[in-house]
Image (cartoon, rainbow, N blue to C red):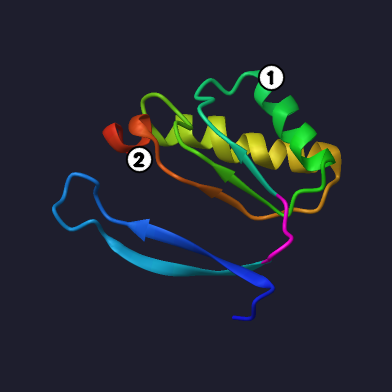
């Protein structure tokens, strides 16, 4: 890694366990001047979420990090409908190149089936 790059570090494991988890490096490397959009807590899948993502993409971001609570119950259908399909739809509609999207679990994500 050179001084002009940033590696994203993630922790895995259960927050309730004594061990705080293991750390790993995501293979994707951001330049130090990268623009990263931070969003979170939209568990509804409402139209304003799509507008928020489209606005973020218009700003020319290099990656998105969702800060948790992508759903309320955590069913596979809810996760797909309120997170994955929303990003797929907005990237397709805007015609913007697909950029990396990461998610950090929130309390709903931890307490549900996340």
Tell me the residue at 31%/37% (across/down).
110
- Residue 62 in the image, given as x and y percentages of width and height: 73, 55
Q: Is residue 96 left or right of residue 106?
A: right
The residue at 77%/34% (across/down) is 54
Residue under label 1, please give it. 47
Q: Quadrant of residue 105?
A: top left
Q: Earlier in the sequence, mark 2 or mark 1?
A: 1
Q: Secondary structure at mark 1?
A: helix
Q: Main SS type for the magenta part?
A: loop
Q: Which mark is residue 114?
A: 2
- List the single residue furthest toward the bottom: 2
In this rendering, would 77 be left or right of 90? left
Looking at the rendered image, the quarter that the C terminus falls into is: top left
- Classify the position of the N terminus by image quarter: bottom right
Q: Measuring from the top left, give residue 24's x and y in whole percent.
A: 40, 68
Which stretch did the figure color magenta?
Answer: 31-35
Residue that lies at the very extreme toward the left in this rendered image: 18
Tell me, yes or no, if residue 74 can be seen here.
no
Percent coordinates x, y for residue 102 in the rendering = 55, 50
Q: Secondary structure at mark 2?
A: loop
Distance between the alpha carbons at the discs numbered 2 and 1: 23 Å
Q: Residues within 10 Å of mark 2 (few under 14, many from 20)?
A: some
In this rendering, the answer to whether 50 lies above or below 88 is above
Q: Is residue 32 magenta?
A: yes
Q: Percent from the top left, x then y, of residue 70?
A: 48, 32
User: Quick check: is 42 in the magenta stretch?
Assistant: no
Residue 69 is drawn in which quadrant? top left
């Amino acid at each position: 890694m050179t001084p002009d790059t940033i590696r994203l570090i993630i922790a895995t494991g259960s927050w309730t366990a004594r061990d705080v988890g293991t750390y790993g490096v995501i293979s994707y490397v951001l330049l130090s001047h990268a623009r990263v959009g931070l969003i979170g807590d939209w568990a509804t899948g409402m139209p304003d979420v799509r507008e928020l993502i489209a606005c973020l993409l218009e700003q020319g971001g290099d990656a998105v990090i969702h800060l948790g609570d992508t759903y309320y119950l955590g069913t596979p259908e809810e996760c797909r409908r309120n997170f994955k399909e929303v990003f797929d739809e907005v990237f397709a509609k805007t015609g913007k190149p697909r950029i990396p999207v990461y998610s950090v679990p929130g309390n709903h994500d931890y307490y549900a089936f996340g």
